[in-house]
Amino acid sequence: MAKHSAQSVELVGVIKHFGSVAAVDGVDLMVQAGEFVTLLGPSGSGKSTTLMLVAGFERPSAGEVRIGGARVDHVPPYRRNLGVVFQSYALFPHMTVAENLAFPLEGRGAGRNEIETRVTGALARVRLEGHESRYPSQISGGQQQRVALARALVFDPPVLLMDEPLSALDKKLREQMQLEIKHIQRDLGITVIYVTHDQGEALTMSDRIAVMNRGKIAQLGTPEELYEHPADRFVADFIGETNLIALVLGRVDGGEADAATSCGLRLRIPAPASGSAGAPITVSIRPERVTVARVAGSEPGKQWHDGRIEEVIYLGEMRKYRLRVGEIGLIAKEQTRSEGGGFAAGERVAVGMSVADLGLVRGSA
Ligand SMILES: Nc1ncnc2c1ncn2[C@@H]1O[C@H](COP(=O)(O)OP(=O)(O)O)[C@@H](O)[C@H]1O
Ligand SMILES: [Mg+2]
């Protein structure tokens, strides 16, 4: 059994209907060989179905799936040779750890010696040496997920598919496993398509993230691109926390424009690519980009408004403020400092926003 080098995965115009439901509704996605791409979205957005189409457990209603550049429409799942770790794809309870790992190798006709070498190597990779003869019930949930990962990797697949593999684990273990999976992926140079509804997980692990909404890819980009330049309201809201402000466009001059809320609060914003005075627009600003101060500053490009603190939420490393500026509500976040400081509910403050931090997004607020 040869070691497979990483392969690309491509979806072209893929649609999958279940009855009248379009679970996947026209997905185009090119995952490069060796890349870690995450499908991120809320429950029901079509992530698992997309993965099933790649794995071959579902057939597309329209469009093509290509692995390593070749169409695989008529290739059954086991011939696609992909490693899979699904939340529901549990270990065989009546088999030891070693037998679980040997299973996909036996199916591929590997010999005794090769099986032993590979099982030992795969267990070392997930740091479970010495657990060969345990049964799944005799190891922890985190260790079981490691074994499932080792089983998916034991035949050196060119592509690894993972569907919410960590969702049953507690937060600490989940975060540790996220980094471990990422390191294993880098070491092996394997292509990974990973599914999660957890944006923190996606940001931590991915080279690129495809944000899914209602069977479509709302935006595809690096974690930084998605966070800094969300294309629409859905992405801005789903990745991190954000303030969305509904405005009516005023005069555009050069790179900037005037805009106002329906109650007349005026803001300077980056000029939109299109749209004339009177057009409705939405801007997004991240809470950590909203400055709260006792008095307005004078940095160029930054505008200040009078505001009032409505609520203070202490989050440990951060303090979160619910603010009122005119008729709009905003969330601001600031780093907590050792010398205390911070503002109290009811205080009148100056609220600063840089023009450059106000991003235009599609869709209404
Ligand atoms: N086997 C199926 N039969 C009927 N509907 C399905 C099936 N699988 C998924 N769906 C529907 O397709 C949509 C997308 O589901 P899914 O891909 O599981 O989303 P996600 O993994 O993002 O939660 C949902 O509306 C779901 O109910
Ligand atoms: Mg799912």
Image (cartoon, grey):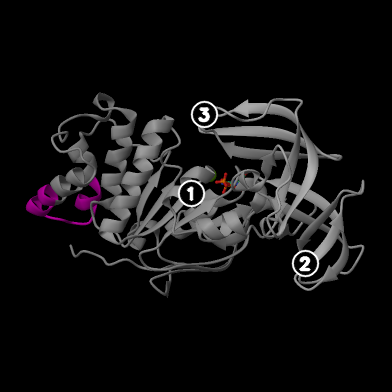
What residue is drawn where x is 26% and y is 45%? 150
* Residue position marked by numbered label 1 in the rendering: 202
State which mark lies toward you, 2 or 1.
2
Circle 1: residue type:
Ala
The residue range painted magenta reads: 102-117
* Residue position marked by numbered label 3 in the rendering: 339
**Residue 364 appears left or right of 311:** right
* Residue position marked by numbered label 2 in the rendering: 256
Query: How many numbered markers are drawn?
Result: 3
Disc 1 crowd, CA 10 A, few/some/many (<14, 14-19, 20+): many
Marks 3/2: CA–CA distance: 38 Å
Circle 2: residue type:
Glu
Mostly what secondary structure, the magenta segment?
Answer: helix
What residue is drawn where x is 84% and y is 54%? 247
Marks 1/3: CA–CA distance: 34 Å
**Residue 202 appears left or right of 231:** left
Mark 3 or 2, nearer chain start: 2
Disc 2 crowd, CA 10 A, few/some/many (<14, 14-19, 20+): some
Mark 1 or 3, nearer chain start: 1
> x%, y% of residue 122?
20, 48
* SS class, disc 1: helix
State which mark lies toward you, 3 or 2.
3
